[in-house]
Image (cartoon, grey):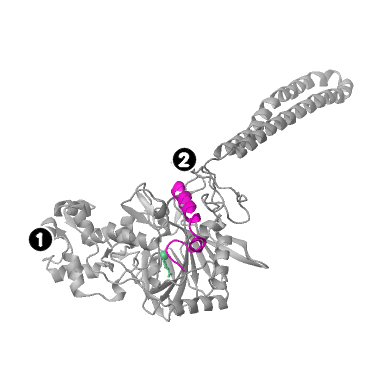
């Protein structure tokens, strides 16, 4: 389905070429005329005056002819282009699956192609012809305000907050009453700790990699000076078993383990070798940790937004569909609403809501359609829509440490013992902070476009976190729109889901009505081991067995 487009655009450029070649003779005519004029002017001024209109009219008639010819050609080319377009559009698309079943962009909002009633299937890989162009909002420039129509009879203002990531703010997205209802529904359902300590999360990974102390040392020693600086250890791993490491607690660990006798904060290869692989973890486990030392210190729950859900939750989903302009099929099949509560002292260190996608990375939501098991997995949250359900008394901003930075370098995130990802300490050094105001929504793209209308690479600049709440409680909610950067997988997944019984369809992967909080797609996983700072997708760090179990739950 790309071909007709190309055909059309080719024809659109053709008239331009024709016009330029057609204009040449006329230009040379004008040139002739100009050349003739100086010769006649000095000798026959009166004649020239008479000749001028004559000449003009002949030029006129010739150019008139040219213009007619140009239009004629353009007309013919347009007709041909149209015929091509119609031809390709009507070619039986054996494989193209549509209508919210297989074609990820069908069954969508008002501005999309009408869903086709038929559904064709084919088992082959080429089964899903790519005929899509996901709309992506334009930021124009930071501070740009555009009016958006999200609810009948009301216009909202949407302000661009940054271009990297593409990030917007919409005040009054929810009414006070809607905020109240969402908080109330979350309380009724019950919230659970977003992160709990699970011992020995990362050991397995080190074992799997089967690296020697020396090899690990060399990997960590970024500047290759034969010493491990605190910064090098933190850059590699901000988190051990879900515990957020700071320069201070690293020093404390060194002291506790007597790992750094001279106390200069550097580890030599010898010192590192003596420590053993999991000394840090063992030390932290037995020392015990407070929730303020975790990656995330909050509680959350999931609220289903499909058929039978509270009207406010369904309205919210509809509004999100209008805001993002994405096909409703994609929004309907995304995760339920996540409602989060931070108590005073709560925080969420900077992270990516969704991780990078490599060829061997699976998306959690389309695992159902993946034929092979993959070593990596992420949630493929194309968009985050974050709602502030109350105005926080003190602190609790959402920080984007590197928004609109000129470059993104992981090593630059910690400099001179200042860790930009630490939202308990360094929110004031973030490039951008959003204050929680009741009813305001912010939304951003966690992935770039692939340049062809689909989801592309992860946008690293979307790094963000929740600053520590210094006073009062903070309530937020997240709507994530899941799209697989692998178009074929997304299409296959939608087709599979469409074949499921109706009840299961709108629930999104992993949560059914009436199911307990343990059944959400992230549940039991966010609580799981080794929640990483780069992504709140601890699934990727689960063992294959654990992942397997989860995938069965989700089915
Ligand atoms: C999140 C998140 C930010 C905030 O829940 O993923 O980044 O301000 N929250 O609470
Ligand atoms: Ca070093
Ligand atoms: Fe987040």
Could you tell me which secondary element the residue under label 2 belongs to? helix
Residue 543 in view, yes or no: no
| Magenta stretch bounds | 485-512
In front: label 2 or label 1: 2
Q: Residue 126, which numbered label?
A: 2
Residue drawn 58% across the image and 69% down it: 315
Residue 234 or residue 524, whichever sits in front: 524
Image coords of residue 74 (percent x, y): 70, 31
Give the percent coordinates (x, y) of residue 147. Answer: 62, 62
Quarter containing the N terminus: top right
Q: Where is 128 relative to 468, above or below?
A: above
The quadrant where residue 47 appears: top right
Give the mark nearer the N terminus: 2 vs 1: 2
499 falls in the magenta region: yes
Q: Position of residue 134 (x, y in %)?
A: 54, 51
- In reply to whether residue 532 is colored magenta, the answer given is no
Q: Position of residue 212 (x, y in %)?
A: 15, 52
Q: Is residue 430 left or right of residue 375?
A: right
Residue at (61, 39) in percent of width and height: 89
Within-10-Å neighbours for mark 2: few <14, some 14–19, many 20+? few
Report the front residue among 326 and 493. Answer: 493
Q: Is residue 470 above or below residue 133?
A: below
Callout 1: few (<14), some (14-19), or many (20+) C-alpha neighbours within 10 Å?
Answer: few
Q: Secondary structure at mark 1?
A: helix
Q: Nearer the viewer, residue 39 or 325?
A: 325
Q: Quadrant of residue 34?
A: top right
User: Which residue is identified by label 1?
Assistant: 274
Q: Quadrant of residue 519?
A: bottom left
Q: Does residue 324 appear left or right of residue 466 in this picture? A: right
Q: Is residue 72 left or right of residue 517?
A: right
C-alpha distance separating marks 2 and 1: 55 Å
Q: Extreme front residue here?
A: 501
């Amino acid at each position: 389905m790309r071909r007709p487009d190309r055909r059309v655009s080719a024809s659109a450029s053709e008239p331009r070429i024709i016009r330029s070649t057609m204009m040449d003779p006329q230009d040379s005519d004008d040139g002739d005329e100009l050349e003739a004029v100086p010769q006649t002017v000095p000798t026959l001024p009166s004649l020239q005056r008479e000749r001028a209109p004559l000449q003009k009219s002949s030029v006129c008639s010739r150019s008139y002819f040219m213009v007619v010819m140009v239009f004629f050609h353009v007309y013919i080319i347009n007709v041909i282009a149209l015929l091509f377009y119609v031809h390709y559009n009507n070619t039986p698309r054996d494989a193209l699956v549509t209508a919210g079943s297989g074609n990820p962009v069908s069954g969508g909002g008002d501005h999309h192609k009408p869903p086709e009633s038929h559904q064709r299937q084919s088992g082959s890989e080429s089964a899903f012809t790519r005929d899509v162009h996901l709309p992506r909002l334009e930021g124009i420039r930071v501070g740009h305000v555009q009016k958006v129509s999200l609810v009948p009879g009301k216009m909202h203002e949407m302000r661009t907050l940054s271009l990297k990531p593409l990030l917007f703010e919409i005040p009054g997205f929810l009414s006070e009453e809607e905020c109240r209802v969402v908080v109330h529904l979350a309380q009724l359902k019950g919230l659970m700790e977003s992160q709990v300590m699970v011992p020995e999360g990362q050991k397995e990974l080190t074992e799997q990699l089967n690296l020697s102390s020396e090899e690990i040392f060399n990997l960590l020693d970024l500047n290759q000076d034969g010493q491990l600086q605190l910064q090098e250890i933190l850059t590699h791993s901000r988190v051990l078993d879900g515990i957020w490491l700071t320069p201070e607690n690293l020093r404390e660990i060194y002291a506790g383990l007597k790992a750094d006798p001279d106390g200069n904060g550097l580890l030599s290869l010898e010192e590192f070798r003596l420590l053993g692989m999991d000394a840090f973890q063992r030390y932290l486990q037995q020392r015990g940790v407070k929730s303020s030392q975790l990656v995330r210190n909050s509680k959350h729950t999931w609220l289903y937004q499909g058929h039978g859900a509270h009207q406010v939750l369904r309205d919210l989903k509809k509004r999100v569909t209008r805001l993002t302009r994405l096909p409703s099929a994609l929004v309907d099949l995304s995760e339920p609403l996540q409602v989060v509560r931070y108590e005073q002292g709560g925080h969420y260190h900077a992270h990516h809501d969704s991780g990078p996608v490599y060829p061997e990375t699976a998306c959690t939501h389309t695992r159902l359609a993946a034929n092979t098991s993959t070593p990596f997995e992420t949630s493929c949250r194309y968009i985050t829509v974050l709602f502030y359900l109350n105005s926080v008394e003190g602190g609790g901003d959402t920080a984007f440490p590197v928004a609109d930075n000129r470059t993104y370098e992981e090593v630059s995130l910690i400099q001179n013992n200042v860790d930009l990802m630490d939202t308990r300490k360094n929110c004031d050094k973030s490039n951008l902070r959003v204050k929680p105001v009741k009813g305001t929504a912010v939304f951003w793209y966690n992935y770039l476009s692939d340049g062809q209308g689909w989801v592309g690479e992860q946008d690293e600049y979307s790094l963000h976190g929740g600053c520590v709440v210094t006073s009062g409680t903070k309530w937020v909610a997240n709507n994530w729109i899941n799209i697989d950067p692998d178009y074929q997988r997304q299409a296959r997944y939608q087709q599979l889901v469409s074949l499921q019984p109706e009840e299961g369809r709108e629930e999104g992967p992993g949560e059914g009505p009436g199911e307990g909080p343990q059944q959400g797609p992230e549940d039991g996983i966010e609580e799981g081991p080794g929640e990483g700072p780069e992504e709140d997708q601890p699934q990727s760090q689960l063992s294959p067995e654990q992942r397997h179990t989860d995938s069965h739950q989700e089915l």
